[in-house]
Structures are given as structure tokens and as C-alpha cells.
Image: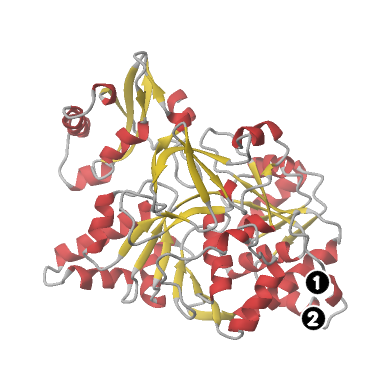
Amino acid sequence: MKDLYIPDILELMNDSVRDYGEKPFIKYVADEEIITKSFKDARDDALVASRHIRSITTDKKHIAIIGKTTYEFIIYYLGILASGNVVVPIAPETSASETADLIKMADVEMVIYDEQYSDRIDEVKSLCPEIMGTINFSGNLENAKEKYSATSEYASLSDIEIVKEDMCAIIYTSGTTGVKKGVMLNTFGMIGNILYTEYWKTFHEGDVTLSVLPMHHTFSFSGDVLYNIRNGVTVCLNGDMRNLVKNLNLFQPVTMRIVPMIAQSLLQRIQALMAKNPELSPKEAAQMIYGKKLIQLGSGAAYLSPKLVEAYEKFDISLRQGYGMTEAGCRVSVLDRGAPIESVGRLLNIVEGRVVDGEIQINTPSVMMGYYKNPEATAEMFTEDGWLRTGDSGYITEEGYLFITGRIKNLIILSGGENVSPEAIENKFNDYQPISEIMVYEENNAIVADVYPNYEYCTLNGIDDVEKEIKNQIAHVNATAKASHIISDVRITKEPLPKTETGKIVRKKAVIG
């Protein structure tokens, strides 16, 4: 691994132009027309964005980018990296006051945003007088291409040398404890994590993937942009989630990165279609939802039920999960069709893994530089010999298959000394549809569960006494549970449990609330 050559972002894009040139890289729908951008287009436009940024200042800056997943967003994200600056992605739904907090925490001095954020940008600037420049990229790329072209007076601004050891990104963690931390990545973290070897190869030059997850998350930007720049895969942008089924049939992807909630939602649509059209085979029904070419779904960010995996096998679609964390650059393990479905895939060939006192620890060239301006939290994340503490409990087989059993910080220790993983209890209800969300915790030395029911499902299926139905199911699970895993109290909530941007329940807030 020490001999692994890792290109910088400019080298990566130039290599893609050499290898794939005018072949389609990004496709999206605009005004009911499919727009296609080649690998060369993307490289050239990213250099335009780089010149645009450096025309404002050639000093290295921390630059926030805020927007939904569009071609322009991707181009300016790449442009920040190509300009030698530090990119700070911020979720587009973030309020002006929270954006201002993140900007101050990350020492941001420039903000690049899309039109949908323009209603908040003035307030952000008033709260952050340190901002010395802003760029609204919506609809302005064509004008920038004229002004900052390779033959313009600004041409030399893109002739820079990127120092791979220097920080190039500050990416905020989702904050499951309610406190966000800025993960510092350099080129080895951003680019190194895409240089792994696939165990189950489905990505080939010319294949199509549909991008549905927000690009301000590392999982999506790394997997749907950087990885596919390297491999010549065409990325189709979904845009509004309401258009997902329409775009699946329009673009006919071979693969797609998702979270379990999306897989579950689309499964329900397939099942509803089969119920209305019993003459359809499972595969035929699935193709009407997913298109005719999909063979693989890669899941991440949350627990994936084995029953969901088995349901997709009936459609000849392989649904598998991987595992990763921003602090590791992104991926730690990836899909492997030979992996047990209860696992989270197989460790990357660029990742070493071990388990110490029940905790999974990893060593990889793409590991973070640390948390920005937070040396105490950084020190807590590393062992004395430099391995990254994942905070997850689990085990690794001799074949490299990784199994996650829970979060160490969530571990419940009862007075009798029993260690209880709340996730182990919560996962028992993953396939029980009357429950939408469940969170287990300890109170007065007993196991308690907060439950947000799936009220819509209960209504459609004639379940009038929702609380009674759920408590009966919990009693059924309790009947075969270990004494330490018995839920002694159930609290039904009317509102969803508080969650992070990636849909993970914020346990501290939920318990206090």
C-alpha cells in the first residue's frame, strides 16, 4: 500500500480525457431534454471553474459549496479541488444560521451556491463578514466558459501544482451525537479511496449508473463522480426523488448507490404493481420500476436487512452493502457477491483491518488528517500505533468479510454487567412494517424503546389500535429474547425521531427529547 500511486485531481481528470475523451460522462434532464457532457467537457469546465475561483483570489482559501446535485455543482466542486483550494460541502437545506456556524468553524472565506440557496445568502454574508466573495453557479457556467476559457486572459490561472499532502477538503460528519466535526482530507484521502480493486466487477467503460444520493456527502461524490471519472462509467443525475422511477426507465442504469430506505420504498412499488397485475413475473414487475439493465444495488449508511436482500434476489438484482466513514476517505469495505448477506462486504485491498477489545480498527492510505481545529477529538480517533478507531463493534473473517454488530458508544451496560447492543434489538423490527422508526436505550437499568409507527401503513392495512399492535409484536420478540434484551417499556411517538442528514437517529436528542 505504501507504493500506491495516487494522482491529484488534475491528473485524474486528464487521465480520463486521455482514456475516454468525448465519451459520455454525465447525463441529466433539462427542459425535458437529455443533456450529455463528455469526460473532456467535464475536465474543461472544471478548469473554467478553477480559473473563475482564482480570478477572485489566488490565495488558498476555504470555500463552501452549497447546492443540490446538478452538473454545475459537480463542476464547481471539481473546480475548487483543481484550483488548489479547500472545499467545504454544506447541505443545501441548511439554514442560514447553521451555515454561518459551519462557515466560522471551517474558516470559510468564499461561498459558491446554487439559485435555490439565494434566499439565504444575504443573511449568511451578514452573519459572516469574513466572506470575501460569492459565486452563484446556477445558469452561469456558459458565461464563465466564455470569460475564463483556456484562451482567455485568465488561462494561466489553472496552471498550478497541487500538493497532495495538503488539506483539500473539510467534510462535516453527520453528527449522531448532535455535534458536527470537520473531517480534514488531503488528496490521498479524496482520491486514494477510489483506487481499490473491485471484488465483483460490474463497472465497465460505457456502463451507466444513476446518482440519487446528495453530492455533499462523501459516499456520493467519491462513488458517483471521482470513481467513475477513473473508470469511464456514465453518471446520470436523478435530481428530484419524485422522478426516480421515471429516470430509472429513462437512463436504464446497470447499477446504483442507495440507502436501504430507497430499496425498501421501490420494493413496495414493485409489490404493489404485482398485486395489481398478477400476470407479471417478479422480474417483469421489477423491470417496470428499475428498468431492464439493472443488476446491482450498492447500499450504505444504514443497516440492510437480509430479508430485503433476499427479496431482490427474486428480481435477479443483487442488493449488497458496503461500509465506510468519512474519516477513512469513504469506503472501508465494498460489495462482494460471495459475501454473507449479513456482512457489510469485504475489506478493500487498500485497507487493513483488525479488532481490538471488540472494536473494528483500520489502517489505510486514505485516512483523514484529523478533525479541523479539534486535536482532542482527533487524538481519540487514533490508537497509539496510528490505526483509526471506527467506533463500531464487530468482527472480520479470514476472507476479509466485515460484520458490524453495533456502535460501541451506544452500548448499554446494565447493572448486572450485561453488554447490550441497541442495534441488535432494533434490527429485529427492521422488517416489521407497522414500525417506521425504533430507538432502544437504557433507563433505570431497563431497556426502553421509543417507537414512531408507520401510520400510513397501519391505516391502509386496517390497523386501528396502532399502539396495541406494536406492543403485541414487541411482546412476541421479547418471548424469545435474552433476559438482558427484553424491552420493558414502549413509548409511542407522534413525530419522527430526530435524525442526521443521512437519516441516522440522533440518539442523545431522542433520549433527552
Residue at left offset 52%, top offset 50%: 352
> The N terminus lies in which quarter of the figure?
bottom right
Q: Quadrant of residue 15?
A: bottom right
Q: Where 13 sits versus 130, above or below?
A: below
Residue located 50% across and 72% down the image: 235
x and y percentages locating residue 360 in the rendered image = 48, 40
Which residue is nearer to you in this view: 312 or 291? 312
Residue 143 image offset from top left, x and y in percent: 74, 76
Task: Report the amino acid beneath label 2.
Answer: Ala
Indicate the amino acid at tag 1: Ser
**Which residue is labeled 1 in the image?**
158
Q: Specify whether 481 is left or right of 391.
A: left
Q: Are marks 2 and 1 in contact (CB under 8 Å)?
A: yes
* In-front residue for pair 268/188: 188
> Which quadrant is home to the C terminus?
top left
Residue 266 coordinates in the image, percent (x, y): 31, 60
Q: Quadrant of residue 403?
A: top left
Q: Residue at x 83, y 53 (%)?
A: 132
Q: CA distance from mark 2 to mark 1?
A: 9 Å
Q: Which residue is mark 2?
A: 150
